[in-house]
Amino acid sequence: MSEQADFSGLLARTQALEYEVAELAQSMSNSEVVGSAAGGGVTVTLADSQFQAVHIDPRVMETCDAEELADLVLAALQDGTEQLRVQAAERMTLLTESINRLAG
């Protein structure tokens, strides 16, 4: 095989990898998750790694005091953040598999 063919193959694999990285970045920026606590009584929406909304079911407020409510909001935030972390890890695994496939 000539050096030109080797270079062309490397260039094609590099371009394919660039495309997959761009797709991964786009999918990560479009991520939205909903973290919850108290069986969904407290939810937080995270999009683009930023907190977008908090919802508290009025029934939750009837059954807990301010400190318990704060704990539930914190638990929902932690749940949403963990979901984003898991999504990012899954996508990085896909990227690593793509790199290995294209390198092989």
Image: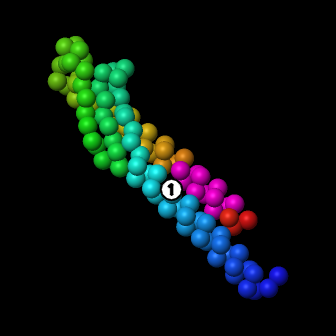
State the residue in front, 91 or 22: 22
Residue stretch rendered in magenta on the structure? 91-101
Q: Is residue 44 left or right of residue 83?
A: left
Amino acid type, label 1 = Leu
What percent of the width, then of the height, locates residue 65?
18, 19
Which residue occupies 25% across, 29% down? 55
Against 75, is 87 above or below?
below
Query: Which quadrant holds the N terminus?
Result: bottom right
Q: Residue furthest right?
A: 1
Which residue occupies 48% across, 49% down? 88
What percent of the width, then of the height, locates residue 78?
35, 37
Q: Residue furthest bottom?
A: 3
Quadrant of res 70? top left
Instruction: Report which residue position mark 1 lands on.
Output: 24
Asked if one can make out residue 27 in the rendered structure from this viewpoint, the answer is yes
Which residue occupies 61% across, 71% down? 14
Against 103, is 76 above or below?
above
